[in-house]
Amino acid sequence: MDFEYNGKNISLKNKVLSKLDLFVIDFVDILTKYADYVVVSGYVSIIFGRSRGTEDIDILIKKIDMETFIKLNRELIGKQYWFLNADNPGELYGMLQDGLAVRIAVKETVIPNIELKFVKSDLDRISLREHMVVKTGKHIINISPLELQIAFKLYLGSDKDIEDAVYLYDIFSKYLDIIKLKQYMSILKVKGADYGIDV
């Protein structure tokens, strides 16, 4: 798979869409009608070809009101999704307001699922505001800025997360804003030299 990098846009060439890709694309096509969103965490490396499994797709959204959430809930249910946490939209919305995630999957399945949260931290807001756009064919997915994604994966610190960070750094090193990467690494108090992320 090749890509074309242009500012905040990355166009993927010759990408064969997996079932997971199609699951994410179908979901965000619905979500974008109701809320500004950004995909973060593990799927960001997966969309660029990293071969690893994941059970959930982490998506942050700008806070919406309950009426809008109910409309989103209604469309998702009508399109054969279900909420793993609860059936009642009011209860689900309360969870989001409390900073918790709601999980959404295709009916009669549990994995993969969407882990949907309202933005709540400064870094969440940066991720949403400065998101990048990945284009594959006619499809568009908003993802976290790569510099923030790499730093955050180092911060999480598991083997899988560090491997995600290294994978993204290796692919995009010549395109990254190193000043921003250093800034995010400083905020999160992480270093990457031991893993080849030497900035």
Image (spheres, rainbow, N blue to C red):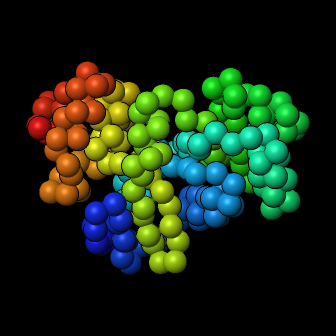
Would you place residue 90 above or below residue 23 in this image?
A: above
Q: Position of residue 72 (x, y in %)?
A: 77, 52
Task: Count how many numbered circles sit on residues in the image.
Answer: 0
Regarding residue 41, the answer to whether it shows in the image is no
Front residue of this view, candidates 110 and 3: 3
Q: Position of residue 101 (x, y in %)?
A: 65, 32
Would you place residue 168 above or below residue 115 in this image?
A: below
Tell me where residue 3 sits by quadrant.
bottom left
Regarding residue 66, the answer to whether it shows in the image is yes
Point 77% across, 48% down: residue: 68
Would you place residue 185 above or below residue 136 in this image?
A: above
Point 30% across, 25% down: residue: 188
Residue located farthest toward the right when viewing the structure as drawn: 88
Point 69% across, 28% down: residue: 97
Front residue of this view, candidates 34 and 149: 34
Tell me where residue 118 sits by quadrant.
top right
Q: Position of residue 195 (x, y in %)?
A: 18, 35
Give the quarter of the figure containing the N terminus: bottom left
Give the quarter of the figure containing the C terminus: top left
Q: Position of residue 106 (x, y in %)?
A: 74, 54
27 left or right of 157? right
Tell me where residue 136 sits by quadrant.
bottom left
Point 59% across, 44% down: residue: 61
Would you place residue 11 above or below residue 191 in this image?
A: below
